[in-house]
Amino acid sequence: MNQTPGPIRIGTMIKANDADPAAEIGRLVPHGFESFEPYFWQVVDKDLPRLAAEIHEAIDGRDVVVDTLGMFGNPLETGELDQATLQGWEALIDNAHLFGARTIAGFTGRVRGKPIEDSLPRFKAVWSKLSKRAADRGVRLAFENCAMEGNWQSGDWNIAHTPDAWELMFDAVPEDNLGLEWEPCHQLVYLIDPLPQIRKWAGKIFHVHGKDATVRREVIAEHGIFGKVPFAFMRTPGFGDTNWTDVISELRLAGWSGSIDIEGWHDPVYRDALELTGQVHALNHLKHCRGGALLPLG
């Protein structure tokens, strides 16, 4: 193993469509978050240069980064909001440097209601152009591995939720700056072991979401996965089944560095009034799992 991994930062996601995302970052920085992923849902409704300046002001010279920006929607379809999502990807690519971001992440999009293979021609047409636009600006594009309640045969948002689809996607657009925004949560919910997946796909993992899951094996044994009783819950890291020490170790063994940004708002227990409590616990848990504070040599 000749690779020397760089630092791994622990941060959180920020809803950029909210009224004042920079102020939210300012409130969270004192808790020890080391990175932030501002993300938009379907539309970019902010003046991006102004937002970048406000975020830098909120960070106020601390050793905190915006490594990744998020753009979630369906850029493969042709509806008004779908087109707004595509334009959002273009705008974030063009303005990523103002935030200091290396990566833009989100869903691939999907031809709605069709099998994954039917989305590949449109995927190739859209993402070939976007990957070229991003490469010209030194930006990477990453796809979250979330099905958004879709499957192989049908769905509304994303095809990048299974390794079989990744093979098809990266064969259709074999560009080095196209990769994954990966998290173990979705793999656990799909009953996939996350650790072998890291070993195979680490070179395509550009960004990691800090989200976990609890799988109730006794429910599966009695009711299966299509019954009325939920067999899995999405969790905040530290409350689910993932061994984050192993996840981070496997990433480091592969030479990976970057940010793990917590994706909150899903935990059935640590939500609403307990949301910040859960996120700060996750922050400290993930820092512990990476080995503690980032210490310089010498």
Image (cartoon, rainbow, N blue to C red):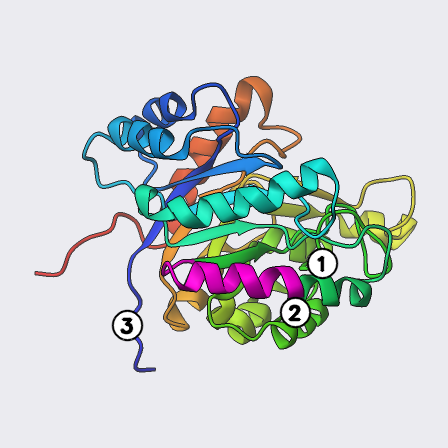
Mark found first going from the N terminus, 2 or 3: 3
Question: Residue at coordinates 58% horizontally, 56% vertically from top-left?
Answer: 143
Question: Residue at coordinates 51% horizontally, 72% vertically from top-left?
Answer: 175
Left or right, residue 239 beside residue 98: right
Marks 3 and 1: which is nearer the front? 1
The image quarter containing residue 257 is bottom left
Question: Residue at coordinates 60% horizontally, 46% vertically from top-left?
Answer: 86
Cα–Cα span, label 3 and label 1: 33 Å
Question: Residue at coordinates 21% horizontally, 29% vertically from top-left?
Answer: 60
Left or right, residue 81 beside residue 257: right
The residue identified by callout 3 is: 4
SS for tag 2?
helix
Cα–Cα span, label 2 and label 3: 29 Å
Residue 139 picture location, percent across and down: 40, 58
84 or 62: nearer the viewer: 84
SS for tag 3?
loop
Mark number, residue 159? 1
157 or 43: nearer the viewer: 43
The image shows residue 86, relative to residue 117, as above or below, that is above
The residue segment tinted magenta is 125-139
SS for tag 1?
loop
The image quarter containing residue 154 is bottom right
Cα–Cα span, label 2 and label 1: 9 Å
Mark 1 Cα shell of 10 Å, populated few (<14), some (14-19), many (≥20): many
- Number of numbered discs on residues: 3
Inspect the magenta stretch and tell me whether residue 64 lies in it: no
Pick out the residue farthest to the bottom.
Answer: 1
